[in-house]
Image: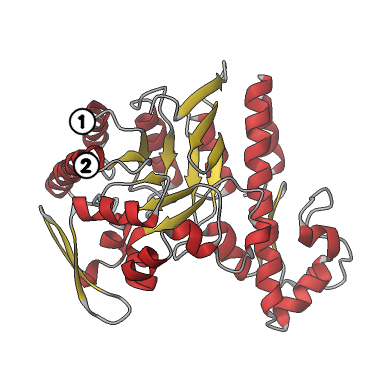
Amino acid sequence: MSDFFRLEKQCSQTDARAGLIQTEHGKIETPVFMPVGTGGAVKAVPFNFLNNHPIILANTYHLYLRPGTEVLKYYKGLHNFIGWEKPVLTDSGGYQIFSLAKLNNITDEGFYFRSHIDGSPHFFSPEKVIELQNLIGADIIMPLDECLPFTSGQNQVENSVKRTLAWAQKAAVYHNSNPAGNFLFGIVQGAGYQSYRKMCAAELTALGLDGYAIGGLSVGEEKKQMYALTGYTAALLPERKPRYLMGVGAPEDIVESVKMGIDMFDCVLPTRNARNATVYTGKGKILLRNNENKYIDYPIEEDCGCYTCQHFSRGYLRHLFKSREINACILASIHNLFFYKRLMSKMRQAILAGNFKAFYENFFNNYKI
């Protein structure tokens, strides 16, 4: 397990880091953005356009409900089922406790929930969630945790953090007793309270897990609050373990968080926004449906090497969206994920070259939020 993560270089002027994660299905250079393939597919993106990404994310809750455990067993895991040969990280389903609160009931033993598909009853324990992720064949797995609204009261947060820690300990025991060649992270919760995030980070660190995630952010709080808690929590985590900021995905938020020492990110933002005609460039967002793009005969970004920018103009992409063509969503998603991958690569190169601070300043001088 000691070879799982290697810290290659840390910026001398900030906390930005470059590292290397090694899994059975390949290596992952950090900082890294993980495209979200919740149910085993990244929406509107053919797999051949994901080849430059070293890892994708899938979700235990959704895969458990559909296609279901029997299908995953038959195909001997998600990699075989979807034809993906690179690493996969699976979320535990803990976020669904938060997002589907009306369909579940949380206890110290786990959470009872009704399927959002057909209303059937189910139960996830901390042990079952690890068992399911082993069945999926994920390379990096997450324990069951409880994500609360950011403005939750102190008593609620204290009880939730204690429950998340108890679940993490049970998950670690099961993981160690049922080795599957994968790597278990802990998830630091605590809503908007530094004291509970400190407690959570300390007790998770004591478990000696393979990596650590920061959860419960980007759930409606102001950016300055998110940045403050990200930096505070990142500083509490072990230097020689990967740090993963869950669900945060705006380009400016990623650059800020890399500066604070975060290694891994995931978010539906680049593909969701692409399907709604919003694309990213080094100067900020472009709304492709706007009339100003009607007669623009050059691509989204002229120095971009993605398939979309190499072949199509903004004017044509606007036409596709206005015509409700499926290709509009596909081509915009291809560009956005390429933009994110290039952004992560540029940051990594800047860290390794010792000029990340200059990159950071240049990014915000050019990027219009």
Q: Which residue is mark 2?
A: 168
> For the residues carrying marks 1 and 2, which lies nearer the camera in this image?
2
Write the residue at 38% across / 29% down: 1
Left-right relation of 347 to 73: right
Q: 319 and 33: which one is in front?
A: 33
Q: Quadrant of residue 120?
A: bottom left
- Graded by Cα atoms within 10 Å as few (under 14), some (14 to 19) or many (20 or more), the crowding at tag 1 reads some
Which type of secondary structure does the marked residue at label 1 adopt?
helix
Residue 367 in the image: above or below residue 35: above
Counting from the top left corner in percent of width and height, residue 261 is at: 48, 29
Residue 184 in the image: above or below residue 349: below
Write the residue at 17% across / 48% down: 160
Q: Which residue is mark 1?
A: 203
Left-right relation of 63 to 274: left
Cα distance in 3D space between marks 1 and 2: 10 Å
- Graded by Cα atoms within 10 Å as few (under 14), some (14 to 19) or many (20 or more), the crowding at tag 2 reads many
Q: 106 and 290: which one is in front?
A: 106
Counting from the top left corner in percent of width and height, residue 194 is at: 27, 34
Amino acid beneath label 1 = Glu
